[in-house]
Amino acid sequence: MITALDHIAIAVPDLDKAIKRFMEDFGLPFDGTEDVEAAKTTTAFFPLPPTNIELVHPLRGEGAIAKYLEKKPGGLHHLCFRSDNLEEDIERLKAKGYQFLADEPSPGAHNSRVIFIHPKSCDGVLVELNQPAAEH
């Protein structure tokens, strides 16, 4: 079951500049960065319980975020919903006709498991489902 809005991801062309903006200009707590090899991103975390803002930047200039930034100067990339049973949610949503970008979940930040729903299934919004490590 989907239990929360896990995070809002913002694609940024200059990670250091964006981290500084969110820390200094907005005064948000910064919780470090993590390279997510499977997604080819470096992600910066700003926890705002019960959700997070994540700044995502291409790792080594590769991956989906790099392609996104080739087309746009940055901006809202996706919404992520937390799940307590990812397989059950995938099965339920597939039965309702949702299309996914992959056949199965992949590794995400903080040892979570993630999968993305195609934007065509959600009125043009890229939606990620995430099951935290403690729940799988």
Image (spheres, rainbow, N blue to C red):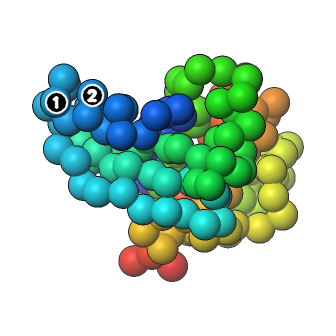
Q: Nearer the viewer, residue 92 or 18?
A: 18
Specify the quadrant of the image occupied by residue 113.
bottom right
> Residue 75: x, y in percent?
53, 24
The residue pinned by badge 2 equals 21
Kindly identify which numbered label has been placed on residue 24: 1
> Residue 66: x, y in percent?
68, 40
Secondary structure, mark 2, is: helix
Is residue 109 visible in the rendered image? The answer is yes
Q: Nearer the viewer, residue 110 or 18?
A: 18
Secondary structure, mark 1, is: helix
User: Residue 135, relative to residue 10: is it above or below?
Assistant: below
Residue at position x 81%, y 58% in the image: 102
Residue at position x 65%, y 48% in the image: 61
Residue at position x 46%, y 34% in the image: 14
| Identity, as a three-letter code, of the amino acid under mark 2 | Arg
Q: Nearer the viewer, residue 93 or 30?
A: 30
> Residue 112: x, y in percent?
50, 69
| Identity, as a three-letter code, of the amino acid under mark 1 | Glu
Task: Give yes or no for contact between labels 2 and 1 (Cβ–Cβ under 8 Å).
Answer: yes
